[in-house]
Image (spheres, rainbow, N blue to C red):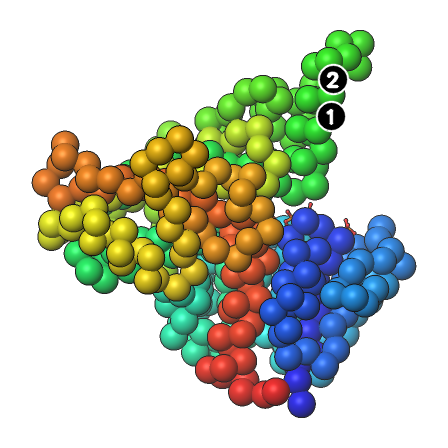
């Protein structure tokens, strides 16, 4: 007996990846249903070698369904996640709506798998922000060895993190640069994204940080350790898929760069590619479609007492969203639901 799984937002970037990953990882599903808005009713999406016809979320009854993987944004999630949860279906949500709710576990399975066990408080589990997910996978094994005091991170985030509209805007604007009569002004982003970088993701907060930067701070504390100080600068770059991060870490204890490299090599979810030569590091294009979070450029930071610098790259639609959600479903299955 396997699971009955609903993929909610199945026509979106993350939803399509969730279907791919459920099939790739042979998630023990007896039945999978694809749900989206009424606009997409009847449209077809792939699930392994099968084709699913998308159903209308608004008319769907979650009774008898075990797990719903949600990727529809906070506004729609606010309406539909409580309905699914009330019907007894466990929601694994990609939006930011429930991430900071004390009764909702925020889970990265390589870091805090045990947190899924408090799912029944609301029948909802939250998936972190894409930039947080890949960072904590890298930080956790180093924290276990040398206790992290402070993290300074700068992100280089791809346009797919802003959904289908983000991808279309980079594509159309790039083409329009070569055809100036076909002007494509910024709509999804606040300035031109083609051939540019924008130091602004999500809304500004009173502190001057953006909400994306605040999320990295709050989520790292909730997932890993509330004593870790994090300061972030989040930047949108003209890359279609794959987020990169330059991470500076200060530890309580000394950690040698070679030991850090060995620790990261052994850690779950990570792949170290770190040769000090031309091309001996990973760039976003190379991480697309992969499960791993890639680590390169590991080196001592001698300007502080116990410092390490590293470069971290991951497919934001996978570890940053869909893969992490499916891994949560797997962890939930092993630790709580125990079917299949
Ligand atoms: N992209 C990332 O890197 C990333 C990372 C982490 C988290 N997330 C989160 O994942 C969610 C989805 O992101 P995405 O990139 O997949 O966006 P997307 O490509 O724009 O897709 C949005 C999906 O949501 C569906 N949807 C929107 N409003 C709906 C409604 N009222 N009822 C039913 N379905 C509705 C859309 O269905 P239609 O096609 O029918 O409109 C579509 O399937 C967001 O919450 C986002 O913050 C994304």
Q: Name the image quarter holding residue 145.
A: bottom left
Q: Which residue matches tag 2?
A: 176
Q: Residues within 10 Å of mark 1 (few under 14, many from 20)?
A: some
Q: Is residue 283 left or right of residue 167?
A: left
- The reply to whether residue 256 is visible in this rendering is yes
Q: Position of residue 79 (x, y in %)?
A: 67, 60
Q: Name the image quarter holding residue 278.
A: top left
Q: Position of residue 167 (x, y in %)?
A: 67, 36
| Near-viewer residue (274 or 101) | 274
Q: Quadrant of the N terminus?
A: bottom right
Q: Which residue matches tag 1?
A: 172
Q: Quadrant of the C terminus?
A: bottom right
Q: Is residue 151 left or right of residue 171?
A: left
Q: Position of residue 71 (x, y in %)?
A: 64, 56
Q: Residue at x 55, y 72 (%)?
A: 329
Furthest residue in direction right, as rendered:
42
- The reply to whether residue 251 is visible in this rendering is no
Q: Position of residue 95 (x, y in %)?
A: 57, 54
């Amino acid at each position: 007996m396997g699971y009955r799984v609903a993929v909610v937002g199945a026509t979106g970037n993350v939803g399509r990846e969730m279907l791919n990953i459920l099939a790739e990882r042979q998630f023990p599903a007896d039945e999978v249903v694809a749900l989206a808005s009424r606009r997409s009713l009847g449209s077809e999406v792939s699930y392994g070698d099968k084709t699913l016809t998308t159903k209308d979320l608004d008319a769907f009854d979650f009774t008898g369904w075990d797990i719903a993987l949600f990727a529809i944004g906070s506004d729609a999630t606010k309406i539909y996640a409580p309905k699914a949860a009330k019907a007894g279906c466990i929601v694994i949500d990609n939006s930011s709506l429930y991430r900071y709710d004390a009764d909702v576990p925020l889970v990265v399975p390589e870091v805090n798998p045990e947190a899924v066990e408090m799912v029944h408080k609301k029948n909802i589990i939250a998936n972190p922000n894409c930039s947080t997910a890949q960072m904590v996978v890298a930080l956790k094994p180093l924290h276990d060895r040398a206790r992290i005091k402070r993290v300074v991170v700068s992100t280089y985030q791809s346009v797919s993190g802003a959904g289908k509209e983000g991808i279309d805007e980079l594509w159309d604007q790039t083409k329009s640069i070569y055809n100036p009569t076909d002007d494509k002004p910024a709509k999804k982003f606040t300035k031109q994204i083609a051939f540019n970088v924008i130091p602004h993701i999500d809304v500004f907060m009173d502190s001057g940080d953006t909400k994306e930067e605040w999320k990295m701070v709050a989520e790292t504390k909730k997932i890993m350790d509330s004593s870790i100080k994090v300061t972030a600068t989040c930047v949108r770059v003209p890359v279609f898929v794959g987020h990169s991060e330059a991470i500076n870490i200060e530890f309580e204890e000394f950690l040698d760069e070679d030991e850090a490299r060995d620790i990261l090599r052994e850690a779950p979810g990570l792949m170290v590619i770190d040769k000090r030569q031309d091309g001996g590091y990973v760039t976003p294009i190379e991480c697309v479609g992969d499960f791993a979070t890639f680590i390169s450029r590991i080196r001592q930071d001698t300007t502080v007492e116990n410092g390490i610098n590293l470069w971290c790259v991951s497919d934001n639609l996978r570890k940053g969203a869909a893969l992490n959600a499916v891994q949560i479903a797997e962890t939930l299955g092993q630790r709580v639901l125990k079917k299949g």
